[in-house]
């Protein structure tokens, strides 16, 4: 039987270390709809991520003042600090955090809110209802630094 020290030396030399596990990845989900928060928490937790929830942009900013996150998934149309204002505050607090903006609708004139969210600093955007495979792919891409 190998000791822990011997096991450590059985790794092939010169290979890159593995990326941090999903369990080390902290995701903050910001949405005023309880069902969407619960759904995303269940799905992302089942994938192995550490997921916290915020009920509004204001709540998200308060949490971010206390905790670092790897990814923020935020709705755009919300009371108590809407998503565009939230993205601006997020960038002020943690400029390198990855942001995924989501929206079930709403338009500002002829412009989609998600297009505006990209201009405000969202790294990825998705319309609701969410395609979970695309969301997971986006999370992986952002964590790998490809997004």
Image: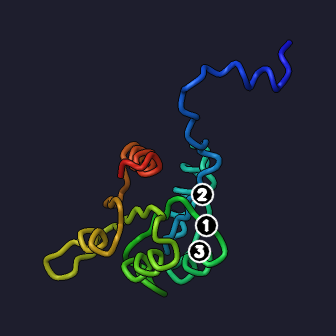
Instruction: Return the residue at label 3.
Output: 64
Please report the residue visible at 62 percent of the width from the left and 75 percent of the height from the top. 63
| Residue at the outermost front position | 14
Q: Quadrant of residue 66?
A: bottom right
Q: Mark 2 packing: few (<14 Cα in 10 Å), some, or many (20+)?
A: some
The reply to whether discs 1 and 2 touch (Cβ–Cβ < 8 Å) is: yes
Tell me the quadrant of the picture where the N terminus can be found. Answer: top right
Q: Nearer the viewer, residue 122 or 73?
A: 122
The reply to whether discs 1 and 3 touch (Cβ–Cβ < 8 Å) is: no
Vertical placement of 10 versus 55: above or below? above
Q: Nearer the viewer, residue 28 or 129?
A: 28
Instruction: Return the residue at label 1.
Output: 68
- Give the CA distance from mark 2 to mark 3: 11 Å
Q: Mark 1 packing: few (<14 Cα in 10 Å), some, or many (20+)?
A: some
Instruction: Return the residue at label 2.
Output: 26
Q: Which of 23 and 105 is in front in this view?
A: 23
């Amino acid at each position: 039987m190998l000791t822990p020290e011997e096991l450590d030396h059985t790794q092939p030399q010169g290979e890159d270390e593995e990326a941090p596990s999903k369990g080390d990845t902290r995701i903050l989900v910001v949405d005023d709809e309880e069902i969407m928060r619960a759904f995303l928490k269940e799905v992302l937790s089942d994938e192995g991520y550490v997921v916290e929830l915020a009920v509004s942009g204001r709540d998200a900013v308060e949490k971010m003042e206390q905790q670092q996150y790897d990814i923020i998934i935020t709705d755009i149309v919300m009371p108590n600090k809407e998503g565009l204002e939230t993205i601006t505050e997020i960038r002020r607090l943690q400029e390198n955090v990855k942001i995924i903006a989501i929206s079930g609708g709403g338009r500002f004139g002829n412009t989609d809110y998600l297009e505006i969210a990209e201009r405000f600093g969202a790294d990825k955007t998705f319309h609701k209802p969410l395609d979970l495979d695309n969301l997971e792919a986006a999370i992986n891409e952002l964590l790998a630094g490809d997004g």
